[in-house]
Image (cartoon, grey):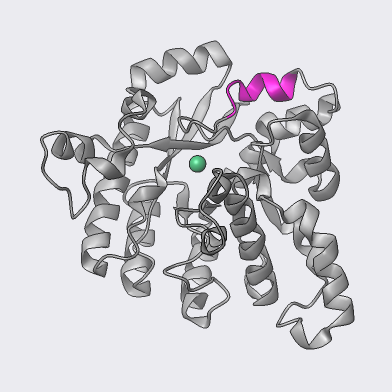
Amino acid sequence: MSIVDVHVHLTPKCFIDVVQKGEDWYGMTVEDGELDNPKNLWTPEQRIAEMDRLGVDMHLVSPTDVFYQYHQEPTVTAKIARACNTEISELANAYPQRFMGLGTLPLQDIDLALAELEYGMGRLGLKGFMIDDHVNGVTYDDPVFDPFWERVERLGAFMLVHQYGPTVTETRTRKYFLHNTVGNSVDRALTYGCLVGGGVMDRFPSLKICLGHAGGFVPYAVDRMDKGWEMFPKYRGMAEKPPSKYLDRFYYDTTTFTDRNLRFLVDVVGSDRVVLGSDWPAPMAVDDPVGAIRDSPVLLEREKEAILWGNISKALG
Ligand SMILES: [Zn+2]
């Protein structure tokens, strides 16, 4: 069984090569690349050596969130997605024992997104895609996304939900790094609430959605969501059951940072829903993701096995 890290990002070389010459790449510049973080310039050989040291067999690699580019003209975003997805596919094909790929989609245009979804899952052999918590402010309960979720479900794509700036908290304050430490987590709770309230999880029961950053505040917020569901029926939307009944319909990565949060996550969502994820090479990554699980004093052996390889092998199988 392979130990798979589902939350790893690539800044594509096709972008780096152009912007380092001072040119722009489909409207994106060197500023978009966070290239001052040398880890974003990683090569497969360097990374494989590090994976061996950390005891990680496989990475499920996604483009860095900046490559969503949903605000651009849709055909431009489609070209960006195709270039990113092709490069990730080439990486996975070159090192099939070490890398698998998640792509990105031009989600502001459903027809273009469906075309890239088909191409990515078919021709490129991707395992799924990483998507933002919203598309230019539109949340995934909007009926415009129904054909998208229908196709995602039919193709069995693994979807990693992952914010990009600005997160929702930035209308209140842009100080103290809260846009990341709090904003990421709030964004994820909103996505959960919208997918559940919009009936998406009822209409498409086989979706494989992983809520990045350990589900954000979902595990803590869901009991309050249940109380609201009980007290204010008119706000239930299309959810057939209380919000907490959908916890086991999602996956959650292990960017919890502490044993107490890890245990809380597992207690709330179930050890069969948690998958290894580090967020490497971001500065907010878990440095030793396998060690954090394997050496954790708060997990049972069978829980460790499920989190390290059992759950993801079922999800991608
Ligand atoms: Zn990330």
Determine the residue positioned at 73% across, 20% down.
294
Quarter of the rendering containing residue 305: top right
Say whether residue 245 is visible: no
Quarter of the rendering containing residue 303: top right
- In-front residue for pair 183/177: 177
Determine the residue positioned at 78% across, 78% down.
240
Height in image: 58 above or below 295?
A: below
Quarter of the rendering containing residue 88: top left
Height in image: 111 above or below 131?
A: below
| Residue 12: percent from left, percent from top | 28, 38
Part of the protein shown in magenta: 286-294
| Residue 119: percent from left, percent from top | 32, 57
| Residue 249: percent from left, percent from top | 71, 58
Task: Using residue 30 as the reference point, say whether residue 102 is left or right of it.
Answer: right
Height in image: 177 above or below 113?
A: above
Residue 52 shown in magenta: no
Task: Using residue 177 as the reference point, say whether residue 281 is left or right of it.
Answer: left
- In-front residue for pair 35/64: 35
Q: Main secondary structure of the magenta part?
A: helix
| Residue 79: percent from left, percent from top | 22, 57
Determine the residue positioned at 77% across, 52% down.
219
Determine the residue positioned at 71% across, 41% down.
274
Task: Specify the farthest residue to the bottom.
Answer: 234
Say whether residue 225 is visible: yes
Task: Locate the C terminus by quadrant.
Answer: top right
Residue 287 shown in magenta: yes
Task: Locate the N terminus by quadrant.
Answer: top right
